[in-house]
Amino acid sequence: QVQLVESGGGLVQAGRSLRLSCAASRNIFNIDIMGWYRQAPGKQRELVAYITSGAFTYYTDVVKGRFTISRDNAKNTVYLQMNSLKPEDTADYYCKADAPAYGGSFWGRGTQVTVSS
């Protein structure tokens, strides 16, 4: 199994930045895909971005150019740098690891991001 712990959320004004961190309990070099998802109140959880073990990245359209996902294998941590935040970015943000080498897919408990206008 893999335990994931998110951090870095908080309350910020629109236009400001936050960096989320997702610390894994296992070596992320062996994790195929690490992704960030978010769930706003009353809405379904949606994919925000992911990064593969080969450092390929994907972003959903609404965050392209504003968010950057990265991974530090030495620290077993994945980051989500969020710039130019908008009120519609307000949500609980979750980290997910797709890790067949460790037995499946795993979720963190989330970190809350609130963007005020």
Image (cartoon, grey):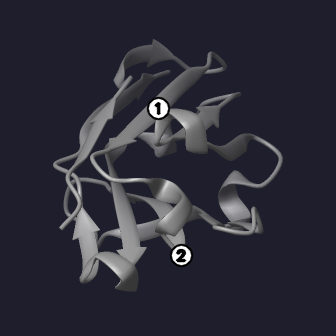
Q: Is residue 65 left or right of residue 27?
A: right
Q: Nearer the viewer, residue 12 or 1?
A: 1
- Please determine whether, in this image, residue 20 is positioned above or below residue 100: above
The residue located at (37%, 81%) in the rendering is 101
Near-viewer residue (95 or 44): 95
Number of the label disc, if any, that sits on residue 96: none
Quarter of the image where one finds residue 107: bottom left
Q: Which residue ends up furthest to the right in the rendered image?
A: 65
| Between 99 and 15, the one nearer to me in the picture | 99
Describe the element under mark 2 as helix, strand or loop: loop
On the image, which quarter does residue 95 sit in? bottom left
Q: Earlier in the sequence, mark 1 or mark 2?
A: 1
Vertical relation: 62 (above or below) 54: above
Q: Pinpoint residue 23: horizontal percent, then vertical percent.
A: 36, 38
Looking at the image, residue 109 lies above or below residue 13: below
For residue 22, side relative to residue 65 (left or right): left
User: Callout 1: few (<14), some (14-19), or many (20+) C-alpha neighbours within 10 Å?
Assistant: many
Amino acid tagged 2: Asp
Instruction: Give the label on residue 32, or none.
Output: 2
From the image, state whether disc 1 or disc 2 is nearer to you.
Answer: 2
Inter-mark Cα distance, 1 to 2: 20 Å
> Residue at the location (16% across, 49% down)?
109
Residue for badge 1? 20
Question: Which amino acid, by three-letter code, is at mark 1?
Answer: Leu
